[in-house]
Structures are given as C-alpha cells and as structure tokens.
Image (tube, rainbow, N blue to C red):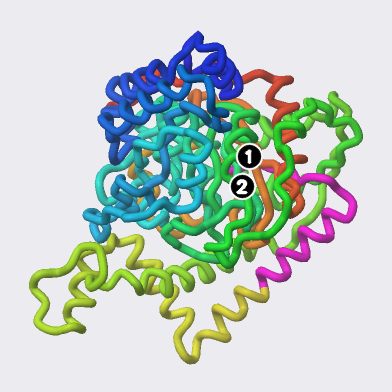
Amino acid sequence: MSLFDKRLSELHDDLKKKELSVTDLTVASLARIREVDKKVQATLLVDEEAAMEQAKALDERLAKGTEELGLLFGLPAGLKDNMVTKGLKTTCASKLLSNYDPIYDGTVSQKLKEADALVFAKLNMDEFAMGGSNENSSFYPTRNPWNLDYVPGGSSGGSAAAMAAREFYFTLGSDTGGSIRQPAAFCGVVGLKPTYGRVSRFGLVAYASSLDQIGPITKNVEDAAYVLQAISGHDGMDSTSADVEVPDFLSALTGDVKGLRIAVPKELIGEGISTEVRDAVLAALKQLESMGATWSEVSMPHTKYAVPAYYLLASSEASSNLARFDGVRYGVRADNAENLLDLYMESRSQGFGPEVKRRIMLGTYALSSGYYDAFYKKAQQMRTLIIQDFQEIYENFDVILHPTTPSTAFKIGEKIDDPIQMFVEDICTVTVNLAGLPAISVPCGFSKEGLPIGMQLVGKAFDEGTILRVAHAYEQAVNLSPKKPELGKGEA
C-alpha cells in the first residue's frame, strides 16, 4: 500500500510505533511532486529545504519519545496560496502580490504548526480566489489529474488537484461560493466547507468577508474530520469567529444513518443538471435508503435567484476588500506613476487580472449612489429569503442532499470567455455560503468519460458532525476510493 493510500490516523499510528519516520513521509511527498506536478501544475511554491529541516526536527522529537504528538504530527500539507504563511510567499496567484513575503502566520497556518503538520508548499488558485476553473491564475492553469485537458475547478483547484494526484496527505482550500466543494467534485476527492465562523479567517486574504471560509480537502471523509478537528476553534483575532464548542468530529463517524431524514431540493436535481450527474446522485440516495435513511423531494423556491444575489454581494465585498491593494503598502508598485492617484491606477491596472477587474467593477457599480438600493440591498434581502428556505426545510429534515455541480469538469478554455456560463456553474453551491451553513462534497460516481461526479450534503449550522456521519457511512458502503487518476490522459 502506498503511503498516500493510508488514512491520516493510520499514518499517525505508524509514526507512534516508529514504523515510519516523518522524513519518510516528506521524501515521498517531495518525490511525488517532482514526478507529477509538471503535468498537474498544482503548486506555486515548494520549499524542499524547509520541508526536510522540519521533518528532521520532528523526527528528533519522535526519537526522544517524551513529548505528546500533535494531531497532524509529521503530515506534509499544501495550503491554498491565499493563506498567510510566515516564511513562505503568499501571492494569491496574482501579479500584484507576487513579491509578498508575510512576517506572520494566519491562525490556520499557526494551528497546523501547533498540530505538528509540515507546511512547506503553497498551491495554485484563481487569482484572489475569483473563478471556478483555476484558469484565472496569473501564473499558469492547474490541470485535472483525471484528464489533463480538463479544468480541476476553482478557485481551490490547486488544492483539489494536488490531493487527487496524491502530492500531499491533505490540503486546505477556501470556499466563498463553492470553491472547496466544486473542485473536490471535479477531482474526485472530499471537500468540506465548515459553518461560517467555525474556522478562523485571520490570515486569509479576503475575497468576500461574509462568505469566505477555510476548510480541508482530503482523500476520504475520516481525514476531513481529522483536519477539521485541528483547525477549528474560536479566535479573538477574527471578529467573525464563532465562540462555540468544538465537538469530537471523529466520534461522529459511526456508520449509522438509520432514521436519517434527507431533503432533496427539486430545483437542484432537475432541469440544468446533467443526466449522468442526476443518475449518480439518485443512486447514492437509493444506497442511503437501503441503509435505513429516508428521503423526500422539497422545494427551495428562491434558489433561482441565488447566483445573481451571490455575485452582487461577493463582488461588492471584493470591491471594498481589494481597495487595500494600492501599490503603496505592499505588493507590486507601478514604476511609471507621475502622482499618487496615478500610482493607484497604474498599480491596480497592471497588477489585477481581467476576472478580478470584472468583479471589482461589478461590485463598485452595485455599491454606487443610486444603485445601492436597486442591487446590493435587493441581494441582501434575497439572501434572507434563501436562509429562510433552509430553516423551513430543517424543521422536518436532518440534512439536504443534491449534486455538488450541474455537470462534470469541462475542458480548459471551454468557458473562460463566457463569464455568465461560468457563473451558472455555481448554482448548486452558492446557497450554502449565503446561508453560512456547513457542506461536504463526496465522490459518488464517474461519467462515461471517466470524470468524477460529486454529491453534496448540507447540514444545520455548526452540525458538521451529521454531514460527516452521513458522508462517511455512504463512502464506506460504496468504496470508490480504490479508483485513482492515472495522469496519462490529456496533452500536458
């Protein structure tokens, strides 16, 4: 069995028994990156020297046997490049921050280090997390390991592709409108978006502050619970961090779904969903039904307004958040400016890519005098109605289940010139962010072309335990994990 096929808990036990060393894990990760990443292009930065230094220090601790090992002891991890990391550049896959070298760790980065994980790599993404295909990176597009001609999804495409290609033992992404779950579905891995406030956003370069949330991308559900355990918790550095108890997520993985009540929104299983995706999700429902769960079709009437509401709100917040990148304090500065105003304009014009500029313009327009009430305020009102849709469903059901994406991964270049078509790809995921709820994407089959299909489980606020339990029970019953990408298809 490959080291990358083992669960995190198994690796932890092997390290404790000294059947493995941290150096073994690190060497395997670095070797795999050198072997496959020139094809996948999931990484932006890999510090091999730092990786081996960290591994040596942890092995010395392991040899002494006097210190308690952290929950993620010795596990090499890759972080999406919008999470601030001391000693590793944080570029957000942008030209504007291409030279930004942080002097501090974000809370999640710090928690990983406290859990004794190895953080030595930053992963590719859509610039400033704006995109759904990873084609908006300022450096190069990441490719889907299942077929290199296809996108891995976005904006956490690098995190999902690196996980599918088994370059790390787990990765982290951020999710603003589906940016963990959609690439996880496209790449055939598990992606978990926690409840808004469950994981600190301090040190996450903000796209839309009321929607962003950090979460794990892993090869199985148990590993997702493991990583979530390590990164969750209240943080006084983040005013949106929720001061709620962190339960034992691993204890939720009982395998029992008897009596579970599942709601299936008809708006997300019918028109607009490809036949292959719909059939795979319906088969998953039958599997859960055979295990003792029940399901019924429900309606979420405001779902059709979710995408325009989301893009108005997210772009408005982006317009505000990205105003800090002005060429003065940090980031790339234009060298041909004649005055201060010219400096702002030239630095932003040269530093931001076309998708980022598009969303800044949209957000600035929505917030402008005369249009605020017509657009931004209406979008906030629609957000409230979407939240109410969820609340009504949870009066009678435990979880909501539907496809993660309307279709499987599409070809690189197929939709990049049509932003509206790209926006519509988010229909299955954006409602969750608008409501601040937890959701997990789990593989549930493959298309005729051999591309992964994902289903999404949405839970009540701060009830990650239930969606982890259902996802884990389903995963154990169908056991899709032995199938892995061969990295032979495609042109790259």
- Residue 330 locus on image (x, y percent): 26, 65
> Mark 1 and 2 residues: CB-CB less than 8 Å, in contact?
yes
What are the residue bounds of the magenta stretch?
A: 382-404
**Kind of residue at disc 1:** Gln
Any part of residue 77 in sight: yes
Which residue is denoted by mark 2 in the rendering?
232
Element assignment for label 2: loop
Which residue is denoted by mark 1 in the rendering?
229
Quarter of the image where one finds residue 465: top right
Q: Is residue 385 left or right of residue 448?
A: right
Q: Compared to 411, does 265 lie above or below?
A: below
Which residue occupies the foreground of this view, 421 or 73?
73
**Kind of residue at disc 2:** Ser
Which residue occupies the foreground of this view, 127 or 20?
20
Q: Compared to 165, does 155 lie above or below?
A: below
Quarter of the image where one finds residue 476: top right
Is the residue marked by circle 1 packed among few (<14), some (14-19), or many (20+) residues within 10 Å?
some
Instruction: Tell me which residue sits at (58%, 32%) in the image.
Output: 71
Does the magenta segment cover residue 351? no
